[in-house]
Amino acid sequence: FSEALDRALLPVFALSRLVEQLDMFATIPEEIGAAFHTGSLPFLPPEEAGGFMRRNMTGTSCSDAEKIERFNNIAATIKRGAKMEGILVNLQVAPLAVVCYAYPLVNTEDFEPPKVLNSTEIIGLDNLAESKRSASAKETIQSDGVVIAGPLTLRQCTDCDPTVKTAFIAWVTIDSLTENQVIKIDGIDHDKWGFATALINWAELVNRSDVNEKFIEKGLNYQLTRTDEVYNYQTREFESKVNILAGDEEFACDEINTESVDINTANN
């Protein structure tokens, strides 16, 4: 999977570099403002936010039709050039970790009808305020490279087909573009604009790799897993959670006929 995953990550790096170079993105963090601060964009009421911590982006660059079209053209060019149809399914930018633009907003081009990835409800999502995203958002802001999480269930697409909802999320941090841009994490200031994001269709990436066929040819079964340390807020302790990333979900192992291999990876 690593070669395909590396190829899918190149577009989000390209997008982050363009954000740094184009004036249309430079001062969007000032329009948004830090969460819960006076003068900052407010959060939408729960009944309008779809269950998310979403800012009201009305009247900002993020709702400007001309700027949305320009972003779409930029992201479409990057996505098309990646030649990762069906795998690279969404590109986003998030000033102050708040999703401002997403392309395609409604993705029908990477899925067989009637499957669709609808990201409309992700606009305005404050990743630092959203409990299930805050840990990865904080890690991204504090890093100088790429942070990858997943496969995750995309909460913005609750009615989507299961094969559409599961994705890797890759974040690439973007340094401050003006003197006053700071993101505070746990009391520490970070000179960051925000980050660029790519959604990678994990199911399709696995399908296009030949790993399944290689095991079948050898008459073997396999299971690719990742063990996460998840904090339990009730017990106030970390617990180990094993996630099955690929292979046979009903995989049964015994000490005699099973070989276990640890795989070291960077950024999850």
Image: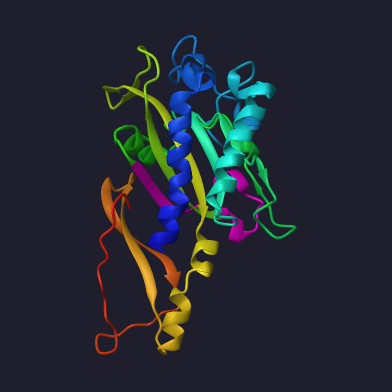
Q: Give the x, y percent position of residue 195.
A: 43, 33
Residue 224 location (% of width, % of height): 37, 69
Direction from residue 23 to residue 117 in the image, left or right: right
Task: Say if 172 sits above or below 187 in the image.
Answer: below
Q: Position of residue 114 (x, y in %)?
A: 74, 57
- Is 158 left or right of 112, judged from the image as shown? left
Instruction: Inspect the magenta stretch and tell me whether residue 39 lies in it.
Output: no
Residue 261 visible:
yes
Q: Is residue 261 above or below residue 1?
A: below
Q: Quadrant of residue 124?
A: top right
Give the camera-side residue of 76 and 203.
76
Can residue 95 be seen here? The reply is no
Residue 262, quarter of the rendered image: bottom left
The residue at the point 25 percent across, 61 percent down is 264
Residue at 51 percent across and 48 percent down: it is 199
- Give the camera-side residue of 224 and 44: 224
Q: Is residue 217 above or below residue 240?
A: below
Relative side of 183 to 200, left or right? left
Magenta residue span? 146-165
Residue 217, position as x, y percentages in the image: 44, 87
Q: Quadrant of the N terminus?
A: bottom left
User: Which residue occupies the extreme front position in the image?
Assistant: 81
The question of residue 161 being in magenta is answered with yes
Return the residue nearer the eye: 41 or 231: 41
Q: How is the image coloured?
A: rainbow
Question: Residue at horizontal 43%, vertical 81%?
Answer: 214
| Count of numbered tags | 0
Q: Pick out the residue farthest to the top.
A: 39
